[in-house]
Image (spheres, rainbow, N blue to C red):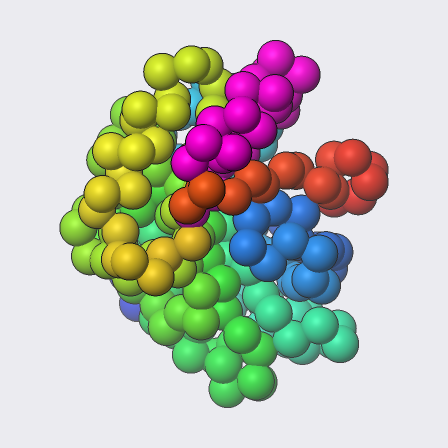
Amino acid sequence: MLTIPENGSLLPLMEEFYTLQGEGYHSGKSAYFIRLGGCDIGCHWCDVKESWNAELHALTDINKIVEQANKYPGKVAVITGGEPLLYNLDPLTKALKAQNIQTFIETSGAYPLSGIWDWICLSPKKFKAPLPNVYTQAGELKIIIYNHTDFDWAEKHAQHVSPNCQLFLQPEWSKATIMLPEIIQYIKKNPQWRISLQSHKYMNIP
């Protein structure tokens, strides 16, 4: 059984790669993605189900992760998963920031917030509600729209974030053809929302 140190010195690294951010507020920016294994949220439409089982991914020294991230000119690291807040991310983010690398996280918000963040993208899931302090610190609320009832669900979450939080609606990839026209019409009527698209999939990049 995988034993992950509580001090955050080792993390189950599924993959890491340099690419463009494809979604949300920072879409189009170059970034180094650090995907951690482990998730118990279990969204049926998740496109990285291979990340769910942390035991499938080798425990990796955070200094090695930072060393790899620092090889690239784009000084932004996006910590994602899985659910990255399953782990103590204080040491990883401190080490990244020591190299002048900005730290972004993509999280469901269902676990206590750790780490030092330049940007928090909160993408709530229906199976576990976000914690209050993640709501208030999120710079971006990104709601995945899978069916018609998700618009009301999005509005309920928007009531909990700060007034400065950027609000995004994003079609679930397999339902994009169906839901995209509805999202467009919804945002035209509710202009506090913006649209997010998985542009990396359209461009065929990781």
Q: Position of residue 87 (x, y in %)?
A: 34, 55
12 w.r.t. 108: above or below: below
Q: Position of residue 152 (x, y in %)?
A: 31, 24
95 w.r.t. 49: above or below: below
Q: Is residue 144 visible?
A: no
Location of residue 18 by image quarter: bottom right
Q: Is residue 94 visible?
A: yes
58 w.r.t. 49: above or below: below
Q: Position of residue 62 (x, y in %)?
A: 50, 68
Magenta residues (range): 167-190
Question: In the picture provided, is 48 more to the left or to the right than 119?
Answer: right
Question: In the picture provided, is 148 more to the left or to the right than 127?
Answer: right
Q: Residue furthest front?
A: 189
Report the residue at 71% width, 56% height from top. 28
Magenta-span inclusion, residue 189: yes
Question: In the picture provided, is 173 more to the left or to the right than 203?
Answer: left
76 w.r.t. 4: above or below: below
